[in-house]
Every structure is written in C-alpha cells, then in structure tokens.
Amino acid sequence: MTTRFIDEPQTISIMHIREERIRQDKKWGVQNHADLRWLPILVEEVGELAKALNEGTMTGGELTQVAAVALAWMECHERNRKASVDLPKVSPPDAPSGCRS
C-alpha cells in the first residue's frame, strides 16, 4: 500500500471541489432539487466549461464547478435516500371491493 501526500493531484482536486461546495452552500443554501432539475444545472456548468475550452480560456475553476455541482447532486440524492429509509413504514389501506391486487 502506498502513502498518499497532500500534494497529490487527486487530493488537491478534492480539496478544491470541497471548497467550491462550501461556497455554493453559503451562496444558495442546501439545494434539494429533483433529479430532473439537477440535470440542466449540471449541463449548464458543462456548457460553460465547453465555452471556456473553445475560447482558450479554460481554467481549473470550470472543472471544479462541474465536479462540485455533480457532488451537490449526489449529496441531494443521498439526503433523499436517507429520508426515505427513515420514514415510518405504513401498511397500505385495504383495497376497495372489486379491486384485485
């Protein structure tokens, strides 16, 4: 097993993504969108990255924002998954007469 150091690209990249997530949460608060709302948000960030790449002005900042939005979506997904697991189990009502299960 190899030892990882703070100056490794993966560690530094993750630190930048985490800093961007903190900045996003401070700016907009915790975001709990439906999956169909997250996709256009992420695609917008990818579009900004593509534009910067085409214009020759791309920096690591655009990549960080794409990764941070994807992480925010994953965080939302995890919050929703946990909330559904924590819901009390309720038995469905009996089916009305004439209905078959």
Image (cartoon, rainbow, N blue to C red):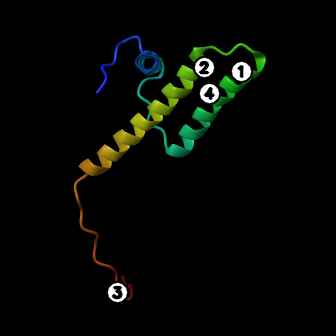
* Residue type of the residue flagged with mark 4: Glu
First reached walking from the N terminus: tag 2 or tag 3: 2
Q: Position of residue 97 (x, y in %)?
A: 34, 86
Mark 2, residues whose alpha carbon is within 10 Å: few (<14), some, or many (≥20)? some
The residue tagged 3 is: 97
* Residue type of the residue flagged with mark 2: Glu
The residue tagged 2 is: 62
Instruction: Find numbered disc 1 in the image and state the secondary structure of the residue it sits on.
Output: helix
Instruction: Find numbered disc 4 in the image and state the secondary structure of the residue it sits on.
Output: helix
The residue tagged 4 is: 45
Is mark 4 in CB contact (under 8 Å) with mark 1? no
Q: Position of residue 16 (x, y in %)?
A: 46, 16
Mark 4–mark 2 distance (CA, rounded to whole Å): 8 Å
Mark 4, residues whose alpha carbon is within 10 Å: few (<14), some, or many (≥20)? many
Q: Position of residue 47 (x, y in %)?
A: 68, 29
Instruction: Give the number of the mark in front: 4 or 2.
Output: 2
* Residue type of the residue flagged with mark 3: Ser
Mark 4–mark 3 distance (CA, rounded to whole Å): 53 Å
- Residue pictured at 77% horizontal, 17% vertical: 55
First reached walking from the N terminus: tag 4 or tag 2: 4
Please, is residue 60 above or below residue 49 in the view? above
Instruction: Find numbered disc 2 in the image and state the secondary structure of the residue it sits on.
Output: helix
Instruction: Find numbered disc 3 in the image and state the secondary structure of the residue it sits on.
Output: loop
The residue tagged 1 is: 53
Is mark 1 in CB contact (under 8 Å) with mark 2? yes
Instruction: Give the number of the mark in front: 2 or 3.
Output: 2
Residue 13, label in figure: none
Mark 4–mark 1 distance (CA, rounded to whole Å): 12 Å
Instruction: Give the number of the mark in front: 4 or 1.
Output: 1
Near-viewer residue (16 or 85) = 16
First reached walking from the N terminus: tag 4 or tag 1: 4
